[in-house]
Image (cartoon, helix red, strand yellow):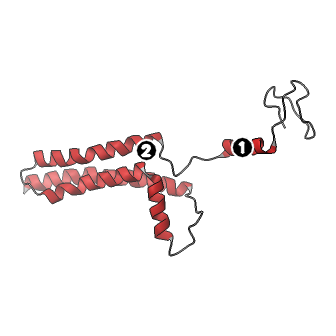
Amino acid sequence: MICSNCGSRLNSTDNKCRHCGEEKPSAEELEKMIKKTFDKADHLKASSLDRVMKWIFFASAPVFITLSVLFSEEKIIILYIFPAGLSVFAGILAGYPKLIWEMEKLRMAGKIYTEGLEPTDKWSIGRKISYWVFYGLAIFLFFVVLYVTHMA
């Protein structure tokens, strides 16, 4: 083991560092340090990018509706809701991973025992890909709605 204060090598029987006198960390402190070092990101907490994107997605929903109504000649309101709805759904996916995980556990409840089940890296990556796909679809559908209502 290495002294956390001076970097000297410690024997397993030493309680203090021979060079600087620093106390050897307890087993609990060592376990916390190891967990902190090797702990992966919490998949159920939105990252700062996720939180920013959530608000961008939410803010773009009324923008999609407003621009669609302003720039289209035919006023078919139901068509304008689809891109806005996809944008809101992308915002929910981005900003509320805990909610999405609970819904995923509810979906899996009939197939497997979900108590204590934790999300994996694949699940987290899939959630991030999903919100970008849904937002991309929202933008695409926005332009399709503008084109269709303008050409009709």
Label 2 belongs to which residue?
Answer: 50
- Residue 124 vs 8, above or below: the answer is below
Callout in the foreground (1, 2): 1
Quarter of the image for the C terminus: give it: bottom left
In this rendering, would 80 be left or right of 40? left
Q: Residue at x 43, y 51 (%)?
A: 96
In this rendering, would 100 be left or right of 119? left
> Which residue extends farthest right?
13
**Which is nearer the eye, 99 or 47?**
99
- Residue 55 vs 97, above or below: the answer is above
Q: How far across and how far down the image is residue 9, in percent?
A: 87, 32
Do the CB atoms of the residues marked 1 and 2 lie less than 8 Å apart? no
Q: Residue at x 10, y 49 (%)?
A: 72
Disc 2 element: helix
Q: Amino acid at mark 1?
A: Lys
Q: Residue at x 39, y 40 (%)?
A: 52
Quarter assignment of residue 51: top left
Q: How far across and how far down the image is residue 55, in percent?
A: 34, 43
Tell me the tag on residue 90: none
**Which is nearer the eye, 1 or 92?**
92
Quarter of the image for the N terminus: give it: top right
> Which residue extends farthest top?
20
Label 1 belongs to which residue?
Answer: 32
Q: Callout 1: 10 Å neighbours few (<14), some, many (20+)? A: few
Q: Amino acid at mark 2?
A: Asp
Identify the mark nearer the N-term, 1 or 2: 1
